[in-house]
Amino acid sequence: MKNIVAAGVLTAFSTLSVAQDSINVVTYGGSWLKAQERAMFQPFTENSGVKVQTIPNSQYALGALRTQVESGNVKWDVINLRPEAIAQACEEGLLENFNVDEVLAPAPDGTPASKDFFPEFLEPCGAPQILYSIQFAYNQTAFPNGGPQTVADVFDVERFPGKRGLQKRAYNNLEWALIADGVHRSEVRDVLATEEGLDRAFAQMDRIKDHIVWWDKAATGIQQLAAGEVAIASNYNGRLWTANVIDSKPVNAIWDHQIYTVTDWVVVKGRMTPQVKDFIRFTTSPEALADISKVISYGPARKSSVAMNKNNWINPDNGHDMTSAMPTYADNMATAFGRDGAWWAEHGERVNERWEQWLLQ
């Protein structure tokens, strides 16, 4: 299926200007980039004539963004930026601050974008796309009689032996460590903000430290889990779904205390050209977000997009019903909690300093 964006969207954007023949978009790689190319970038280029040049290094974009803006040598236009990085970059004036209803398309029934996007996902410098999560999963062959079901199980190496594949970062890991120690998800950041809370989190991490295999790239973490090099691992829900359903790997997701994040487009200061504005409007349209959520199991950030897919969350390639694979599925959200970019922007330096010390011990 070459073009899965609804014909109505293509018509709506038929007047795009082509004076700028390409835009540079910094985004994540892997399954997410493939989904973006299919449901967003290719249709946008076919309709507008504006090419999308992708640079897959969003994980480390903030430092490079600062350098570009401060030097006046800006090469990027649009970025998928991490939540805490958005908070910092917006405060530092590195990003465009735009009116949502002026830039983003309304819902099909005319509802303004500011009312159609889930309100908790809107922020001054960002245009929301989808909600994804990081969660745990286990290799089914490692636990033929039933694997871990909770975060506490992940930290229990006696009941559930084997290596743990974890992303080499403080955030998520320390929050899960407190969850495993009995802290309620609503209180995790308040506890983690204290020295006593950090002590508790690192005490839990000490329980599994000798069993950890670190990963920096999500693709590496998936490979380790699928190959049985680790028994349990954290990773992004879309990659876990792809490994299990598309690649037929023995990977079983654990939805307990998934940590979800809304991924936003941000526009580099001074780069809100007509073509960039059209790109943001097109790729956050109700139709585009509905379509991309059928290609990868990430939930759209717009109410109208959810309504478009209601009772029809069927993957166009294999006919698989993705409803229960969505992080926004009711059962999956039972213990979920969101990534707090503002908290990590405020406390991250202190926490990460101790994290680096712990890694060296």
Image: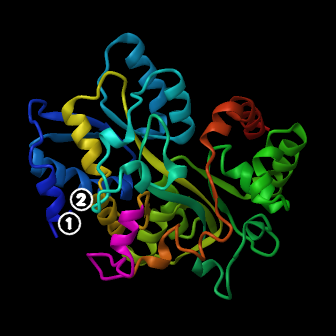
Element type where label 1 sits in the image: loop
The quarter holding residue 80 reads top left
Q: Give the residue type at disc 2.
A: Arg
Mark 1 highlights which residue?
A: 4
Horizontal side, residue 59 vs residue 253: left or right: left
* Structural crowding at the residue carrying mark 2, measured as other residues with C-alpha within 10 Å and reported as few (<14), some (14–19) or many (≥20): many
- Residue 55 visible in the displayed image: no
Quadrant in which the N terminus is drawn: bottom left
Q: Are marks 1 and 2 in contact (CB under 8 Å)?
A: yes
- Foreground residue among 16 and 145: 16
Residue 104 belongs to the span the image colors magenta: no
Residue lying at the far bottom of the rendered structure:
145
Secondary structure under the numbered disc 2 in the rendered image: helix
Residue 161 point in image, percent of width and height: 74, 71
Q: Which residue is mark 2?
A: 38
Q: Residues within 10 Å of mark 1 (few under 14, many from 20)?
A: some
Tag 1: amino acid: Ile
Give residue 110's position: percent from left, percent from top: 29, 57
Name the outermost residue toward the top: 71
Question: Measuring 68% from the left and 38% from the top, which residue is drawn there?
Answer: 343
Q: Residue at image x 76%, y 53%?
A: 209
Per the rendered image, the range of residues in magenta is 303-320
At a point 15% along the width and 53% down the height, the residue shown is 12
Check the image and tell me how it is coloured: rainbow
**Magenta stretch containing residue 310, yes or no?**
yes
Q: Position of residue 37 (x, y in %)?
A: 25, 54
